[in-house]
Amino acid sequence: MDIIGLGYLGFEATPATLDQWRSYGPEVMGFQLGAVPANDPESLYFKIDDRRNRFAFHPGRIDRLAYIGWEARGRMEFVAAVEKFRAASIEVTVGDAALCEQRGVKELIRFKDPVGYQHELYYSQKWTPKSFVPGRPHGGFVANARGMGHLVVITPEYPPELESFLIDLMGFKWYGAGAGKGKTGFFRAKLNESTSHDIAFGFGAGKRGVQHVGLFVKSVQDVGQTYDIVRKRNLPMMMTLGQHTQDPHMSFYHFNPSGFAFETIVELEPWHNDGFELNPEKMSTWGHELVGPILGPSVRNVEELKDF
């Protein structure tokens, strides 16, 4: 499948969490409040580039990931992907006109992976050139045609079918297990040659939820200013500033109102494929001191999620 990368992410949030996001998104992260679709007036949308939105927060009973949106390169690639899903007997739901309008895309389908996460595949998301205006002084995010960043989720099981689904069906490239402990898999979309991974699944017995979302900013200053704001507001952190062994980037992690972490990242040099699978002896070459939990409150026991 000719998938560019992550296109958007949708979450459910309690009323209290939604209220926090209205100020946190612009003031801490530098997001722009996006236009709210007429058929979804109670939700909250954010822009981080010239696309109509990259994040959506919908009213819900708990804070949780609702869907993961993947961008196909265009209509022909989308049609081919739909045919491939159906040939593999994967159940897909075609998004109606109202849902496509809500997402701001031409067409979409919905499907689940073998461990139960809800995905969407779409093409042609609405955008307006030079429309992104950050919520505070900010140099901007690296997104647009390369995807919005990456996502790490925890799964209560890690069956062989998961990797087959991602690699053989969706066409993702296996990157490796990283330096983490236990069973973890990092994957990147077929058309992504800019970053090491678009999504990672980490095994956590009896656990499910988002561990973190990685967002790329345009300068060290953007990382530093966000870091200062987080510290001045005494927002909970996961890891201090540091540089991962497997990527030539600098980043830090802190927790947002929904209970998962944002990794704010700057590329110190362009990412390049090493040509072989890495096996880092340690996660980071410097920094990234663990000062908070590795799994925030967004990762829940599966029993808590059985009715959602």
Image (tube, grey):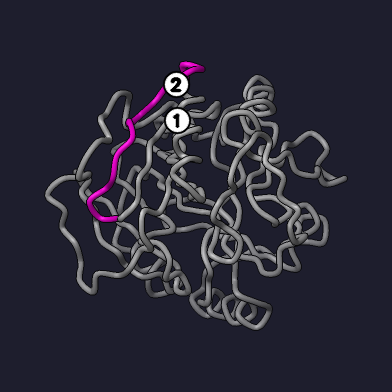
CB atoms of marks 2 and 1 within 8 Å: yes
In this view, 91 is above or below 14: below
Residue 104 location, quadrant:
bottom right
Give the vertical position of 294 relative to 171 (above or below).
above
Residue at 27% over, 47% down: 244
Left/right of residue 116 with respect to residue 183 in the rendered view: right
Q: Which mark is residue 231?
A: 2
In reply to whether residue 244 is colored magenta, the answer given is: yes
**Seen in the image, is 188 located left or right of residue 122?**
left
Residue 277: quadrant of the picture: bottom left
Residue 221 in percent (x, y) is at 48, 40
Q: State which region is magenta.
A: 232-247
Magenta stretch: residue 88 in it? no
Q: Where is residue 40? Give x, y as percent.
A: 81, 42
Residue 56 figure quarter: top right
**How many other residues sit within 10 Å of disc 1, few (<14), some (14-19) or many (≥20)?**
many
Q: Amino acid at mark 2?
A: Arg
Q: Position of residue 238 (x, y in %)?
A: 35, 29
Residue at the (57%, 62%) spot, across then down = 70
In this figure, which residue is indicated by the disc labeled 1? 227
